Image (spheres, coloured by chain):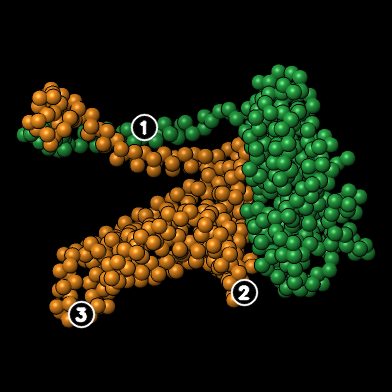
Amino acid sequence: MATSSEAIPSIGMLGRSVMTRRRGAVLELGAEWFIRGTGLLTVVLLVGILALLARQGARLFLELDYPIGRFFTYGNAITDNTTDPSQFRFGVMPPLIATFWVTLMTLVFAIPLGLMTAVFISEVAHPRVRLLIKSAAELLAGVPTIIFAFVGLALVVPRVNDYFGWGAGGLSGLTAGFVVSFVAVPLIISISDDAMQAVPVDFKENAYALGCNKLQTIWFVIMPAAISGITAAVMLGMARAIGETMVVLILAGGNSSLPHDPTESMRPMTATIAAGFGNASEQSLVRPALYMTGTVLFIITFFTTLIADAVLDRQRKRFAR
Amino acid sequence: MKLLRRRTSASIVRGPFPVLISLGVVALLAIAVAACGDDEKDTGSTGSGTAAATQIPNVTGTISLEGSSTVQPFSIALIDEFAKVYPNVKINPPSGKGSGAGITDFINKQVDIAQSSRKMKDDEKSQATAGGLDPFETHILDDALAMAVHPDNKVAQLTLEQVAKIFAGQITDWSEVGGSGGAITIYTRNEESGSFAYMEEDVIQKVLGKEVKYSSDINKQANAPAGLTAVSGDPSGIFYAGLGNLADIPQGKVKVVPVSLDASSKGVVPSEATVKDKTYPISRGLFYYTNGDPAKSTNAALKAFVAYALSDEGQKLGEEIGFVGIK
């Protein structure tokens, strides 16, 4: 083995033993299944999480006799520790709608801000400025969200209260959505900048040659060409908003009844689960109800991703060369 | 090289058989995960029975606490002092998640002591009994639930009935009780909190009847500082907090409203004196819940800890924090 190493240095240990010892078939089969296994692990995790959540959640209806209709229609989500189904006032709708409002508000603020910044650093700014902004965005993406929550509490909440009087003293779904958008923006900037940078330079040159100005080039050539990356960026930002817990727990206001518009105080699904889990004893109705809420959350994110994939696919076909 | 390459390319195209196997593996694993989900064992109950009944200075063992954020500052101070006297006892300090959360951990046998700012509910007691526990209540201190509003609010005092009606959503505007700020914004703790349950069961339901609940328009805050901060910034807000929690916010940021028993009597400011002579209407006990009477417990560390809480030193610690001793 030692002597052959000078002869074929580039193949390495594994390759040498494959060649010299004729263990190739066995080794390769092992390696192949190992790699395949790591790939399949994601599928296993996905199915496993869903199975676990649904199994724990289904107890609510099957063993503990909580009416399934009430779970989906009740207009409040109170996580009292109780074993009596008639005393348990929990419906998944209010947290679900709250999550919807916060996510919508996040996107309303994050998409323009994120995309415009990405266009600026990718197409307009000096490379040094681009580097500075991009590193800043990437650093920002690593800041724990509780920090965003505190900054929001100190800066955003009093102003929302003073100027608009929304929610509970400025704590509302909109406030939370606004602050979550700053959690999502670095992600959107970073990924859509990468996507726009990946657009071949001759696209741009052709556009200029045909007489497009800079704005037209960006709007009609670069953005369509980078659309799959941009959509992916927005979707990741959206997933971040749906899953964000700490900011909404502190800033959304904590009203567990059904919110009618984003300026109300509300408690989204993640915050409901976080706030209620301490009360969830083994025998209580709260525990399976929160698992069920988690199942609904999981299914929603799953379908969001599926829809995003479908949209992405359509866009790709539309702009296919 | 040639050999290697050929093998690799051959192994890529091998028909549908491996795909079927991999799908089977996925299905099996999914079933296995689902099947294993429930087999959690109660390994959390630490300490019990590990320490024999030995002499006081040689007390060893482990105890763990969880629960009320109101009791939290007392428990932490008590643990610090207790550790000086009994250095061989290991204590897992509480995180102050809330009374309900502590009692839930106690029911789930994850902690030895549940610290609580309310009495255990019948429902919780039956859950504990069903799990083979014998919940025992030790009354350690008394506390008041103070009504906090914005400093600019002109409200002079509230009757107990008005407090109940505000939190039940039957009084919705400050003008109805002589206050300012327009429509009332109600802030409460969230469901894990003892104060949350105490307000519903011992104030709202005692005054207005068993069927009355909290208003559906309440804003649940994760902890007492969050609620106090919210009220300090909202002229229309009202929030409740334990006496010990009022230290969480600088003085003058919120106004504590005097509460009277009925319309004819004068409002009383919550304080050590008014809790002790029972003139403040919204006072409550603070409790440690243990499995069986700690004085008879086989866990010497647990026995010593609860006894220390009730000792003169322990009670004095509680009073320094702002609570009221029970003696």
Q: Residues within 10 Å of mark 3 (few under 14, many from 20)?
A: some
Instruction: In the rendered view, tell whether residue A6 sits above or below residue A185.
Output: above
Q: CA distance from mark 3 to mark 1?
A: 58 Å
- Which chain letter goes with mark 2? A
Q: CA distance from mark 3 to mark 2?
A: 46 Å
Residue at the spot of label 2: A162
> Contact (CB < 8 A) between labels 2 and 1?
no
In this view, which residue lies farthest toward the right? B264
Q: CA distance from mark 2 to mark 1?
A: 58 Å
* Chain B drawing hue: green
Q: Is residue A304 left or right of residue A210?
A: right
Instruction: In the rendered view, tell whether residue A6 sits above or below residue B141.
Output: above
- Which chain letter goes with mark 1? B
The picture places residue A18, in percent across and down from the top left corner, at 14, 27
Tell me the orange chain.
A
Residue at screen point 28% across, 73% down: A124
Q: Of residues B211 and B296, which is closer to you in this image? A: B296
Res. B172 in view: no
Location of the C terminus of chain B by quadrant is top right
Which of label 3 and label 1 is nearer to you? 3
> Contact (CB < 8 A) between labels 3 and 2?
no
* Amino acid type at image mark 3: Cys
Residue at the spot of label 3: A212
Res. A195 in view: yes
Residue at the spot of label 1: B28
